[in-house]
Amino acid sequence: MITANLAEYHGISANRVEEWGDKIVVHTQDENGANRMLFVDKDTLRPIEDTFALASRRD
């Protein structure tokens, strides 16, 4: 349900989501194949601007 809402309303394609306290961490993959973590508000599912994203890439 959360992954469908993220895709439909925010254009975020999530591979996996986890609840972290008052946030949700969304695991995504960008167009270059890098894995990213995005933090979103638990109630609105909007990205939280003051958080960072981690990236890794498999070559």
Image (cartoon, rainbow, N blue to C red):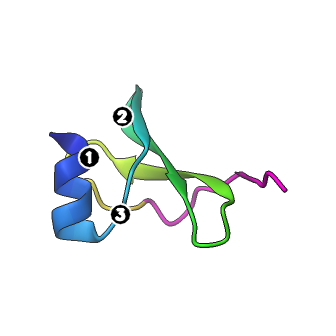
Q: CA distance from mark 1 to mark 2?
A: 17 Å
Q: Residue at x 78, y 55 (%)?
A: 57
Q: Is residue 57 magenta?
A: yes
The quadrant where residue 11 appears: bottom left
Q: Position of residue 50 (x, y in %)?
A: 56, 62
Label number found at residue 24: none
The residue segment tinted magenta is 48-59
Residue occupied by mark 1: 3
First in sequence: mark 1 or mark 2? Answer: 1
Q: Determine which residue is flagged by label 3.
A: 12
Amino acid type, residue under disc 1 in the picture? Thr
Q: Is residue 53 left or right of residue 24?
A: right
- Which tag, 2 or 3, sits closer to the chain's start? 3
Quadrant location of the N terminus?
A: top left
Q: Is residue 9 above or below residue 40?
A: below
Residue, disc 2 = 22
Amino acid on which the number 2 mark rests in the picture: Asp
Is residue 44 visible to us here? no
**Which residue is at 39% across, 50% downward?**
14
Residue at the far front in the pictured view: 59
Question: Of helix, strand and loop, which one carries label 2?
Answer: loop
Q: Quadrant of the C terminus?
A: bottom right
Mark 1: few/some/many CA within 10 Å (<14, 14-19, 20+): some
Of badges 2 and 3, the one in the foreground is 3
The mark total stands at 3
Residue located at (26% from left, 46% from top): 3
- Residue 20 left/right relative to 36: left
Residue at screen point 26% across, 53% down: 45
Label 3 sits on a secondary structure element that is loop
